[in-house]
Image (cartoon, rainbow, N blue to C red):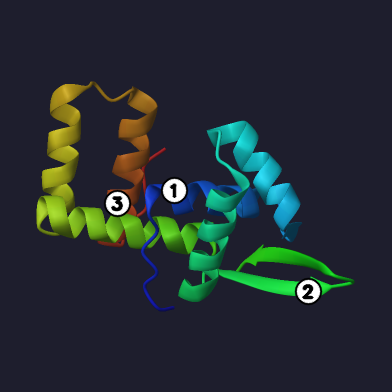
């Protein structure tokens, strides 16, 4: 899938569509008016921008325009994570984990999950 970078505002629109698709323009507008305080024109501009990027598809039926997410949330999250990792930590997962754990203590459950992932990457079976 082609890289589609989403701005913070576009993430809000996508969250609405990931929650439920398709939605009419009116439903998206009402959702974002409530959630973010946006005007109708702001929401419609963002929907148009997302459609141009290929993240959203628009369909007209019986005079109503509906919008559906074409970009899956998991794909968008992975792209954002890869971009962040590359930009901030020069692609180093260990540098990122080190930075995160310096500021906060990880609960044992998360440590166990990380350990299991590392064991799996090594080709071994996690203990327990």
Residues tagged 1 and 2 counted as in contact (Cβ below 8 A): no
Q: Residues within 10 Å of mark 3 (few under 14, many from 20)?
A: some
Q: CA distance from mark 1 to mark 2?
A: 24 Å
Residue at image point 39% right, 28% down: 109
Q: Between label 3 and label 2, give the one nearer the viewer.
A: 2
In the picture of the structure, the residue carrying the numbered disc 2 is: 60
Residue at image point 56% right, 61% down: 47
Q: CA distance from mark 3 to mark 1?
A: 38 Å
| Local SS, label 3 | helix
In the picture of the structure, the residue carrying the numbered disc 1 is: 9
Q: Between label 3 and label 1, give the one nearer the viewer.
A: 1
- Above or below residue 65? Residue 39 is above
Horizontally, residue 125 falls left or right of residue 88, namely right
Which of the image's four quarters has the C terminus?
A: top left
Percent position of residue 59, x then y: 74, 74
In front: 102, or 61? Answer: 61
In the picture of the structure, the residue carrying the numbered disc 3 is: 119
Percent position of residue 90, x then y: 9, 58
Horizontally, residue 4 falls left or right of residue 118, namely right
Percent position of residue 57, x then y: 63, 72
Q: Residues within 10 Å of mark 2 (few under 14, many from 20)?
A: few
Horizontally, residue 7 falls left or right of residue 58, namely left
Residues tagged 3 and 2 counted as in contact (Cβ below 8 A): no
Q: Earlier in the sequence, mark 3 or mark 2?
A: 2
- Above or below residue 52? Residue 92 is above
Q: Earlier in the sequence, mark 1 or mark 2?
A: 1
Q: CA distance from mark 3 to mark 2?
A: 50 Å
Percent position of residue 118, x then y: 27, 50
């Amino acid at each position: 899938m082609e890289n589609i970078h989403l701005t913070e505002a576009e993430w809000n629109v996508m969250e609405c569509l990931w929650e439920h698709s398709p939605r009419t323009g009116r439903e998206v507008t009402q959702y974002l008016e409530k959630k973010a305080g946006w005007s109708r024109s702001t929401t419609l501009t963002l929907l148009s921008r997302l459609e141009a990027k290929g993240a959203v598809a628009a369909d007209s039926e019986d005079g109503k325009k509906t919008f559906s997410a074409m970009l899956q949330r998991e794909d968008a999250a992975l792209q954002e994570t890869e971009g962040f990792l590359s930009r901030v930590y020069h692609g180093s997962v260990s540098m990122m984990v080190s930075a995160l754990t310096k500021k906060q203590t990880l609960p044992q459950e998360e440590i166990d999950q990380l350990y299991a992932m590392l064991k799996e990457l090594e080709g071994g079976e996690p203990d327990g």
